[in-house]
Image: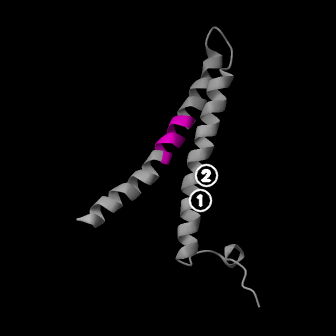
Amino acid sequence: MRAPFYRFIAILLLVIPGLTATYGFLAMKDAFFAQFDPDGHLLWGKFILGLILFLLGVAFIGGWTFFRDRKRNYLAPRFKPKRRK
């Protein structure tokens, strides 16, 4: 009974940053295309917030994938930790 619950929590740990990155991308897109309205100005606050959310979400998922691959020894030799002689 515990294993499915822990897997659900693990999936949530990846879905939440994914949704954050998606919302950030959509906020940047909306801010960029708002400059084509008759007002004609770029919403800098929304664009910067979207950029931060997008970068945080992508960095979390990328870091999680990198450390998981390092643990399973899937990395190229240049990314493997150096061994002391």
Residue 42 in which image quadrant:
top right
Decide which of 7, 33 is in the foreground and name it.
Answer: 7
State yes or no: residue 19 in magenta.
Answer: yes
State yes or no: residue 80 in magenta.
Answer: no
- Is there a contact, CB below 8 Å, between mark 2 and mark 1? yes
Give left or right: position of 78 versus 60: right
Residue 74 in which image quadrant:
bottom right
Up/down of 54 relative to 77, above or below: above
CA neighbours of label 2 inside 10 A, class few (<14), some (14 to 19), many (20+): some
Residue farthest along the front direction in this orientation:
2
Secondary structure of residue under mark 1: helix
Name the kind of residue labelled 2 in the image: Ala
Residue farthest along the top direction in this orientation:
38
Q: Which segment is the magenta one?
A: 17-24
Secondary structure of residue under mark 2: helix
Residue 26 locus on image (x, y percent)? 53, 32
Residue topped by disc 1: 63
Residue 22 locus on image (x, y percent)? 51, 40
CA neighbours of label 1 inside 10 A, class few (<14), some (14 to 19), many (20+): few
Q: Quadrant of the C terminus?
A: bottom right
Name the kind of residue labelled 1 in the image: Gly
Residue topped by disc 2: 59
